[in-house]
Amino acid sequence: MKILVPVKRVIDYNVKPRVKADGSGVDLANVKMSMNPFDEIAVEEALKIKEAGGAEEVVVVSIGPAKAAETLRTGMAMGADRAIHVTTDNEVEPLAVAKILKAVVEAETPGLVILGKQAIDDDSNQTGQMLAALLGRPQGTFASKVVVEGDSLAVTREVDGGLETVKLAMPAIITTDLRLNEPRYASLPNIMKAKKKPLDAKTPADYGVDIAPRLKTLKVAEPPVRSAGIKVEDVDALVAKLKEMGVA
Ligand code: AMP
């Protein structure tokens, strides 16, 4: 079995995003970019399944600008076998990403696609679900545990108030949650080896996908600054305040 892992290059999670002065978006000039953290978890899970004998090949795919190739090299330094880079300088919305991934899945026929539950730049949480719908395949989203059982998978999902385990017939789609695993770091020798692994360059047009945006961003703004709290004398005053605010 082959596992496909879509990985997105996003603003590093340690960087505090700066909004552009004209409110048209986030300023990405000279900002550290990294693999989306949930996608690192997806790569790790694919590698674990391969190491346990459940898959023969792990392929990483990214849709994005020339520099997304660095993110793919990171995936290969972690252990993925090869990469597909669908190059575009335009912002690609989740629906267009899902359509391109559908075409990649049709060309590559993986038994499993593991995506992150969301990209930390757009926080859409849509691509995995849309891909499963476009392909008509079962999906296990927000996975905190994945067990391969022959031709099917047991996926434990983080849902409100607990955990739910679902059984999926493969081929299937999984999206990762934070507690699924601890992604490995790439070692220096593996970073060197990754430079020689195959990276296939494609374009959205190769897959016949129209990536024209369907959404228009009206405005991007900093979150409001939190206003200072108040101090109350005792518990009675606290309860009275909470009642006043309608929360008790
Ligand atoms: P989103 O729906 O945008 O929150 O993204 C969810 C997941 O879809 C990400 O964690 C990635 O696994 C995948 N994904 C989204 N955008 C891209 C992209 N441009 N290239 C590769 N994978 C992507």
Image (cartoon, helix red, strand yellow):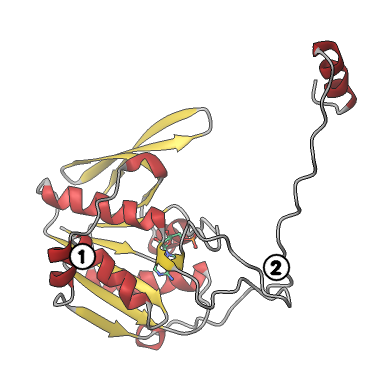
The quadrant the C terminus occupies is top right
| Cα distance in 3D space between marks 1 and 2 | 35 Å
Residue 152 appears in the rendering? yes
Residue 107 image point, x, y percent: 25, 74
Nearer-the-camera pick, 90 or 13: 13
The image quadrant where one finds ligand 1 is: bottom left
Residue ID at (52%, 27%): 161
Helix, strand or loop at mark 2: loop
Name the mark on residue 220. Answer: 2
Residue 139 image point, x, y percent: 38, 50
Nearer-the-camera pick, 103 or 213: 213
Residue ID at (43%, 64%): 134
Indicate the quadrant where residue 99 lies: bottom left
Q: Is mark 1 within 8 Å of ligand 1?
A: no
Name the mark on residue 67. Answer: none
Q: Residues within 10 Å of mark 1 (few under 14, many from 20)?
A: many
Q: Residue type at mark 1: give it.
A: Ala
Q: Residue type at mark 2: give it.
A: Val
Say left or right for 145 vs 132.
left
Say left or right for 7 vs 11.
left
Say left or right for 37 vs 245.
left
The quadrant the N terminus occupies is bottom left
Residue 117 image point, x, y percent: 44, 52
Residue 171 appears in the rendering? no
Residue ID at (36%, 50%): 138
Residue ID at (62%, 67%): 18
- On screen, 65 above or below 48? below
Nearer-the-camera pick, 205 or 236: 236
Give the labeled residue for mark 1: 77
Residue 112 image point, x, y percent: 26, 56
- On screen, 165 above or below 45? above
- On screen, 106 above or below 146? below
